[in-house]
Image (cartoon, rainbow, N blue to C red):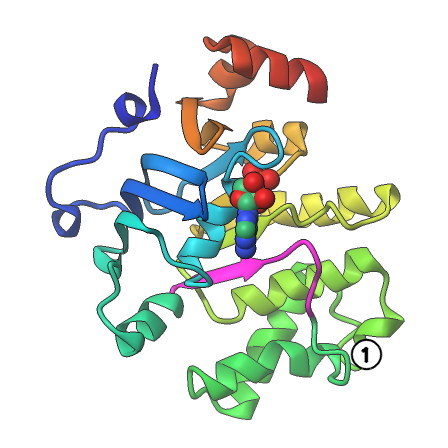
Amino acid sequence: MSAENAIPAPENPAATDELIRFDNVTKRFGKNTVLDNLCFSVKPGKHVTLIGPSGSGKTTILRLLMTLMKPEEGTIHVNGQQLYPTQGEKQLREIRKNIGMVFQQFNLFPNMTVLRNITEAPVRVLGLSKDEAEQRARDLLDLVGLGDRCDAKPTQLSGGQQQRVAIARALAMRPQVLLLDEVTSALDPELVAGVLDVLRDIARTTDITMLCVTHEMNFARDISDDVLMFDSGRVIESGPPEKIFGDPEHERTREFLGAVL
Ligand code: ADP
């Protein structure tokens, strides 16, 4: 089963209820074709996980959505608006407001308190008042279990706590979609579970759409509506987690899961 068949892309993206849609997207670095004519879509509120071997192109998808790089070919839509080919900087900025991202490295501002890390973008980009932004930040810190650490600096927190602040910071912009790029890979093993539990809670209790690159297969099984298995820049198999983890069709998927599970 090819991904093109697994998640068919309707004719007119603006008329669909898809939040993210890639049509025939090709991304190359020099002679290296990293994404090869990729088609997939994600509906609002769904949690989609990208799995596959290192170097298969998963992170590149998130980076394209964050407008950190451009594809050579194809179109990308977010919420019916065309991200690529680009319509200009102003529109890109508008579309990007709908997208939050949490990286492997937490990338918090080291000189700011936890609270300020979270209020900075809502005040500057969304124009929230300081009071509104602080209230929103405190609620989110409660959600990620750090309500008592508002005044701490990032260096006073563990890696797991810093990552939970980074999750709160992304959510403070109230994005429609949260991109998660191997968010536990840089953590000591004993800190991983706390971060994944927070994400499980968010997946269960909010209607945010999630697109998640992870090597944590149990987590992927728990939160995903759909799992896309990548190999060499293509989706070789996709479906609900019970199917992909329980009865994969593709030999490459079986090999990969055999190595990581
Ligand atoms: P994955 O997330 O599946 O591990 P990536 O999307 O990070 O894969 O990378 C896919 C391929 O693209 C790899 O071969 C990687 O070396 C290459 N790549 C990623 N970013 C760049 C870049 N900025 N310049 C050159 N090659 C890159």
- The relative height of residue 224 versus residue 239 in the rendered view (above or below) is below
Q: Is residue 103 highlighted in magenta?
A: yes
- The relative height of residue 154 versus residue 159 in the rendered view (above or below) is below
Residue 89: where, in percent of width, then height?
31, 76
Residue 209: where, in percent of width, then height?
42, 49
Is 259 positioned to the left or the right of 21 in the image?
right
- Write down the region rendered in magenta: 98-107
Quadrant of the image containing the C terminus: top right
Residue 194 visible in the shown view: yes
Main secondary structure type of the part rendered in magenta:
loop
**Dot 1 alpha-carbon crowd within 10 angstroms: few under 14, some 14 to 19, many 20 or more:** some
Residue at position x 33%, y 19% in the image: 2
Residue at position x 48%, y 51% in the image: 62
Q: Residue 192 lies in what quarter of the image?
A: top right
Residue 259: where, in percent of width, then height?
70, 17
In the rendered structure, which amino acid carries the disc numbered 1?
Answer: Lys
Front residue of this view, candidates 58 and 179 = 58
Residue 203 visible in the shown view: no
Quadrant of the image containing the N terminus: top left
Residue at the far front in the pictured view: 31
**Disc 1: which residue:** 153
Is 260 positioned to the left or the right of 250 in the image?
right
Q: Residue 39 lies in what quarter of the image?
A: top left
Is 62 positioned to the left or the right of 74 in the image?
right
Residue 179: where, in percent of width, then height?
51, 52
- The relative height of residue 56 versus residue 20 in the rendered view (above or below) is above
Q: Is residue 75 highlighted in magenta?
A: no
Front residue of this view, candidates 69 and 30 = 30
Residue at position x 47%, y 29% in the image: 227
Residue at position x 72%, y 49% in the image: 195
